[in-house]
Image (spheres, grey):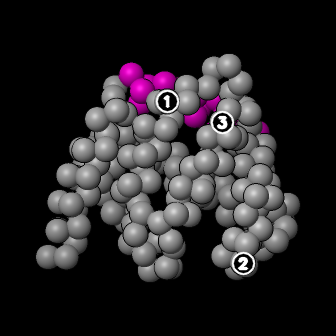
Amino acid sequence: IKMKLLVVVLVALVAYVSADCDVLARFRVKHQWQKVFSGHNRMDFSHDLWKEFFHDHSDLVALFKRVHGENINSPEFQAHGIRVLAGLDGLLCALDEEDTLNQLLAHLKGQHTERGTKPEYFDIFGVHLLRALDDHLKTEFARKEWQDCYAVIAAGIKP
């Protein structure tokens, strides 16, 4: 019953927040994501994102101790960085599939709640995600669409 209630709440929340992440916004976000998260680009993008993330928030390195967050060039952290972005990739792919998106969000919310992840960490990550996208996409970057669609994702995962 708890899981069903959680899914119902998530569906309502995603429907409310997703009003601005419309069909065109989702298309642009997915198209731009393919540019930064394909081939070797994904490693460069991940490295740049996490480098700036930890530069600005060195106090959060300890949260990534298990995966050697103190060294973003370590194989363990590189793998973790890609896993995080692969999870984001799955969510972005599911933006058009509400049932799938809600299931993925509920699963990730459960994982992050278990780990005691603070809601503000998703806001911090979002700032750095947008910066990295801006750096990599340059003039193509659709900031408003990314803000709107990331808001849907963050709202669904935040504990």
The residues bearing labels 2 and 3 have C-alpha atoms spaced at a distance of 25 Å
In the rendering, at what x and y percent does residue 112 appear? 47, 71
The residues bearing labels 3 and 1 have C-alpha atoms spaced at a distance of 12 Å
Q: Assign a secondary structure to mark 3.
A: helix
Q: Is residue 96 left or right of residue 108?
A: left
Residue that sits furthest to the top in the current view = 139
The residues bearing labels 1 and 2 have C-alpha atoms spaced at a distance of 32 Å
Amino acid type at circle 1 is: Lys
Amino acid type at circle 3 is: Leu
Indicate the quadrant where residue 149 lies.
Answer: top left
Residue appearing at x 70%, y 41% in the figure: 132
Is residue 39 a member of the stretch shown in magenta? yes
- The residue at which mark 2 appears reads as 62
For label 1, the crowd category at 10 Å Cα-Cα, with few meaning under 14, some 14 to 19 and many 20 or more, is few
- The residue at which mark 1 appears reads as 144
Q: Nearer the viewer, residue 20 or 11?
A: 20
In the rendering, at what x and y percent does residue 65 appear? 73, 78
**Badge 2 or badge 3: first in the primary sequence:** 2
